[in-house]
Image (cartoon, rainbow, N blue to C red):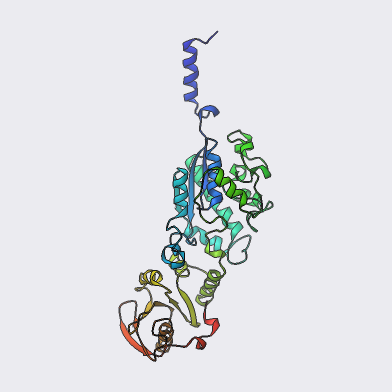
């Protein structure tokens, strides 16, 4: 016998009065979107289960995207886009980009779990990112966190023994779901509560990218960022060497955003302990360095086409003559007997030097950073 209409109305009213009722509430997840394939696939896997997902991306200043790809000729074939924003657009989700430059300094300078092969604090970094996502989750009343981590993919942060450390130290605990390898790990809260179907999650492990590429094809995802690389410059040996050099010669391990941006650009030479040169290697880099002319002494050849160079540090007259010889070396006047170089101070004070370009063999290898 069907229930009375008044009884049906009472049931419907009760459901709306108690939005926590499971079958009336769409669960909400926040996904760490790096711009790479893994986070894209992890997010897609959860979207497929009817979960409302929003993305979050933390800006540390150390990422390649949106900067060097835009100004370097050898990156010309790469799409000029912020991959995190692009991934969010492809998935049809909202993306929150959060500046964490100041907070992230402690991760770079004092990593509890140490560095990787260069200056990459990968385990501390992942824990920091998940912690920030957990704080955002709590502030915005979301239910759980998604990452694109895969067991065995990264030597520091993505090992079976380090994944629990990230969950614990971030405070996320079992609200942290890793859809791409969930079946290899203990069930999390979203799985136990039935918010997501564990059987529809994956068991990817190891460093091979073939499973992810196959999964991308199954989702009809054809365009994505290079699947095997991260975007963090701290994993790059040349960049780490420049950062270490800067710390050593300044006598402090602090840094500002301009410092870490300039380390990404140009040819860096340190001919003397108290100053170094940053010389543009192509038009895009010269244009970028132009923006720093009012912060540094800068040099540029005027008798021959050549690069813009910044002097980072304190340079006397002899130092500037040496700098001019180096700048001439990297101009189209490198084989000329004499090259005229304009030297301009941060406040516009101007002079010219006519110098003989240094020959390649006269530049010691240890000047190059």
> From the viewer's perspective, is 203 left or right of 45?
right
> From the viewer's perspective, is 31 left or right of 311?
right
The residue at the point 41 percent across, 70 percent down is 285
Which sits in the foreground, 184 or 228?
228
Residue 337, given in percent of the width and then of the height, sits at: 39, 92
The residue at the point 56 percent across, 41 percent down is 45
Q: Is residue 21 visible?
A: no
The residue at the point 64 percent across, 46 percent down is 181
> From the viewer's perspective, is 88 left or right of 341?
right
Residue 318, given in percent of the width and then of the height, sits at: 42, 89
Q: Using the image, determine if residue 272 lies above or below residue 254.
A: below
Q: Using the image, determine if residue 18 lies above or below residue 77.
A: above
Tell how many labels: 0
Residue 194, given in percent of the width and then of the height, sits at: 60, 33
Q: Using the image, determine if residue 300 lies above or below residue 83.
A: below
Residue 107, given in percent of the width and then of the height, sits at: 55, 60
Quadrant (top left/top right/bottom left/bottom right) for the N terminus? top right
Q: Is residue 368 visible?
A: yes
- Name of the residue lying farthest toward the top: 1
């Amino acid at each position: 016998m069907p229930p009375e209409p008044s009884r049906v109305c009472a049931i419907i009213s009760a459901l709306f009065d108690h939005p926590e009722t499971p079958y009336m509430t769409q669960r909400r997840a926040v996904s760490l979107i790096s711009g790479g394939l893994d986070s894209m696939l992890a997010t897609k896997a959860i979207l497929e289960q009817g979960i409302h997902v929003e993305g979050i991306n933390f800006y540390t200043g150390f990422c390649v995207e949106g900067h060097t790809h835009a100004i370097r000729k050898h990156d010309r074939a790469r799409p000029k886009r912020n991959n995190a924003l692009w991934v969010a657009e492809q998935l049809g989700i909202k993306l929150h980009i959060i500046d964490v430059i100041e907070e992230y300094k402690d991760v770079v300078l004092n990593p509890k779990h140490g560095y990787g092969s260069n200056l990459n604090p990968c385990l501390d970094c992942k824990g920091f990112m998940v912690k920030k996502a957990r704080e955002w989750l709590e502030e915005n009343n979301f239910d759980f966190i998604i990452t694109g981590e895969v067991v065995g993919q990264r030597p520091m942060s993505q090992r079976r023994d380090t994944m629990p450390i990230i969950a614990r130290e971030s405070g996320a605990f079992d609200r942290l779901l890793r859809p791409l390898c969930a079946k290899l790990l203990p069930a999390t809260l979203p799985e136990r509560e039935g918010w997501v179907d564990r059987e529809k999650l994956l068991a990817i492990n190891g460093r091979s990218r073939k499973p992810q590429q196959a999964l991308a094809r199954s989702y009809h995802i054809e365009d994505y960022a290079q699947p095997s690389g991260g975007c963090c410059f701290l994993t790059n040996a040349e960049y780490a060497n420049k950062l270490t050099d800067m710390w050593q010669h300044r006598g402090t391990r602090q840094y500002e955003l301009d410092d870490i941006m300039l380390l990404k650009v140009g040819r860096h030479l340190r001919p003397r302990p108290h100053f170094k040169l940053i010389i543009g290697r192509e038009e895009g880099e010269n244009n970028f360095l132009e923006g720093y002319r009012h912060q540094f002494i800068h040099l540029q050849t005027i008798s021959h086409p050549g690069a813009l160079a910044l002097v980072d540090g304190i340079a006397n007259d002899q130092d500037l003559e040496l700098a001019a010889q180096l700048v001439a070396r990297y101009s189209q006047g490198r084989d000329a007997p004499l090259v005229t170089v304009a030297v301009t101070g941060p406040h516009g004070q101007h002079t010219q030097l006519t110098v003989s370009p240094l020959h390649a063999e006269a530049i010691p290898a240890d000047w190059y950073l």
